[in-house]
Amino acid sequence: GENVEQHPSTLSVQEGDSAVIKCTYSDSASNYFPWYKQELGKRPQLIIDIRSNVGEKKDQRIAVTLNKTAKHFSLHITETQPEDSAVYFCAAGHNTNAGKSTFGDGTTLTVKP
Amino acid sequence: GAVVSQHPSWVICKSGTSVKIECRSLDFQATTMFWYRQFPKQSLMLMATSNEGSKATYEQGVEKDKFLINHASLTLSTLTVTSAHPEDSSFYICSAARWGQSTDTQYFGPGTRLTVL
């Protein structure tokens, strides 16, 4: 089955700096890579996703890059703000079955004001 | 966007009792819903896939007789934790898949915090 590794497990940055979270996956058949933000006690919220037909996707301060050859993808948050503080999960799965995605262990991001 | 609700948001029960959790897709139909559990400071673990009108598919290691899933309509799936014990205490989250153009996206419910005394 799929195995997703996520690094780092914790990340602390100063407000305004950039944050990068990296994930690797094992199943070359995976073609759907979502990123979720989860605040304490709340539901995971989809913040951005990328499908394997593109190498990069951007939405305002958030971007995701995908390297299918190396089987890794990354989340980039620029101009971080304190409200970006949360746990971020990457996942890998299939276009037609997003619910069966395998999740990484999460990264706790703290943005210091 | 797609909205998924879950009820109750929290529940405390005595050991040995059963607890039912409901998951609803409010503004779209979901032929497939998913149930996860999440322990504190850990990732989401998929328990089972709930299929409308058919039996749920359970992940390896998940007891189907303990975690009963029913998906009777295109907008409702229920998870019943039978004979709950303290080790079943966890955050249970459902999700529903919404289809776009040949792809689907997953939307999560707000979760149910179960505490078994």
Image (spheres, rainbow, N blue to C red):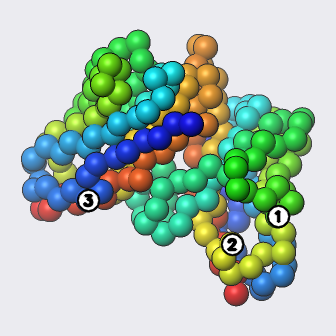
Q: Numbered disc 3: what chain?
A: A
Q: Mark 3 points at which residue?
A: A10
Give the residue at mark 1: B66
Say whether disc 1 or disc 2 marks the residue closer to the N-terminus. 1
Contact check, label 3 and label 2, Cβ < 8 Å: no
10 Å neighbourhood of mark 3: few (<14), some, or many (≥20)? few
Q: Answer above or below: position of A110 versus A70.
A: below
Residues tagged 1 and 3 counted as in contact (Cβ below 8 A): no
Dot 2: within a 10 Å radius of its alpha carbon, few (fewer than 14), some, or many (20 or more) residues? some
Q: Give the residue type at disc 3.
A: Thr
> In the visual, does A12 lie left or right of B14?
left
- CA distance for labels 1 and 2: 10 Å
- Residue holding disc 2: B88
A47 relative to B109, above or below: above
Residue type beneath disc 2: Asp
Give residue B105's position: percent from left, percent from top.
Answer: 56, 30
Rendering quarter of residue B99 = top right
- For the residue labelled by badge 1, is the local secondary structure a helix, a strand or a loop? loop
Q: Nearer the viewer, residue A87 or A41?
A: A87
Image spot of residue B70 (x, y percent): 86, 49
Identify which residue is drawn at 40% across, 25% down. Answer: A50
Q: Distance between the residues labelled 3 and 2?
A: 27 Å
Q: Can residue A30 be seen in this view?
A: yes
1 and 2 marks in contact (CB < 8 Å): yes
Q: In this view of the protein, which residue sits in the foreground, A11 or B29?
A: A11
Q: Mark 1 lies on which chain?
A: B
